[in-house]
Amino acid sequence: MLLAIDCGNTNTVFSIWDGEKFLATWRTSTEHQRTADQYYVWISSLMSLQKLDVRITDVVISSTVPRVVFNLRVLCNRYFDCRPLVVGKPECRLPVGVRVDVGTQVGPDRLVNTVAGHAFYGGDLIVVDFGTATTFDVVDHDGAYIGGVIAPGVNLSMEALHMAAAALPHVDISRPDSVIGKNTVACMQAGVFWGYLGLVNGICTKIRAEHGRPMTVIGTGGLAPLFASGDAIFDEIRDDLTMHGLRIIHEFNRNDE
Ligand SMILES: Nc1ncnc2c1ncn2[C@@H]1O[C@H](COP(=O)(O)OP(=O)(O)OP(=O)(O)O)[C@@H](O)[C@H]1O
Ligand SMILES: CC(C)(CO)[C@@H](O)C(=O)NCCC(=O)O
Ligand SMILES: [K+]
């Protein structure tokens, strides 16, 4: 059984793949101090709560936080008796090309999204991932990652307003009906929601023009559905894109051995 781990700057998601489907998915905050033993207590109790009596034999990891990989490796060695495949490490091969400036360390989450995007939707894609940052990954006709855009994440932008301005409260993002806010919270929500929708649409339009071929836009990450309700900016929404990318990369490396 394969355990796929996606470590973002805010949250870490664990998912178990049985060869055909994901049996369970669990989320925890990303903390580099967490030890292998702590991870194991957490995951093994969730497995028994869901009566998942399976043996993990393989692990694949994508981490945008390099420091957490150490303890995850210990988790794999100590409790699952395996060496994890870590995306971005030289020993982990990718089924797609990467055409960027020499020396660029592309975020592994973006490579994983590219692989899954290509597997599900072919080529000439824009994958928009709403995580800590909002990333746009441009996938060429042959599936290669050829660059993209990194913008501040939605929750980060909201939090920055609150942190920097004494009179602005902590507000959760939501879709306001009007753009003219009649109170502080409504004004902030309008700024972030409609501002962000403009950002996503504007960037996709510019990418399309620069790429010069028709492109499919795929939305993923926790907030993708919220923005999809604004205007039809996405052709597809897939919240499990990263997890599928991880298991596809794992399959590719296993077949390649
Ligand atoms: N309406 C909403 N308002 C605020 N947050 C939301 C809403 N809907 C979903 N989310 C958030 O989206 C997040 C899930 O997004 P995702 O896993 O893509 O990114 P993340 O965990 O925030 O970032 P990263 O992957 O970079 O760690 C959850 O933390 C959830 O709190
Ligand atoms: C942009 C983030 C933070 C998004 O998770 C991650 O992909 C990352 O740390 N990337 C490294 C820089 C790059 O992708 O070019
Ligand atoms: K993510």
Image: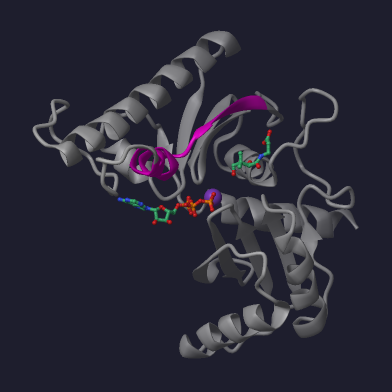
Q: Position of residue 62 (x, y in %)?
A: 69, 54
- Residue 137 occupies quadrant: top right
At 68% across and 31% down in the image, what residue appears? Answer: 143
What is the count of numbered marks?
A: 0
Q: Position of residue 192 (x, y in %)?
A: 31, 33
Q: Which residues are magenta?
A: 147-163
Query: Would residue 174 appear left or right of 181 to someone viewing this image?
Result: right
Q: Is residue 233 visible?
A: yes
Query: Would residue 35 appear left or right of 8 to someone viewing this image?
Result: right
At 68% across and 54% down in the image, what residue appears? Answer: 63
Q: Position of residue 132 (x, y in %)?
A: 51, 46
Quadrant containing the C terminus is bottom right
Query: Would residue 246 appear left or right of 232 to someone viewing this image?
Result: right
At 26% across and 38% down in the image, what residue appears? Answer: 229
- Residue 176 occupies quadrant: top left
Residue positioned most to the front: 166
- Residue 210 occupies quadrant: top right
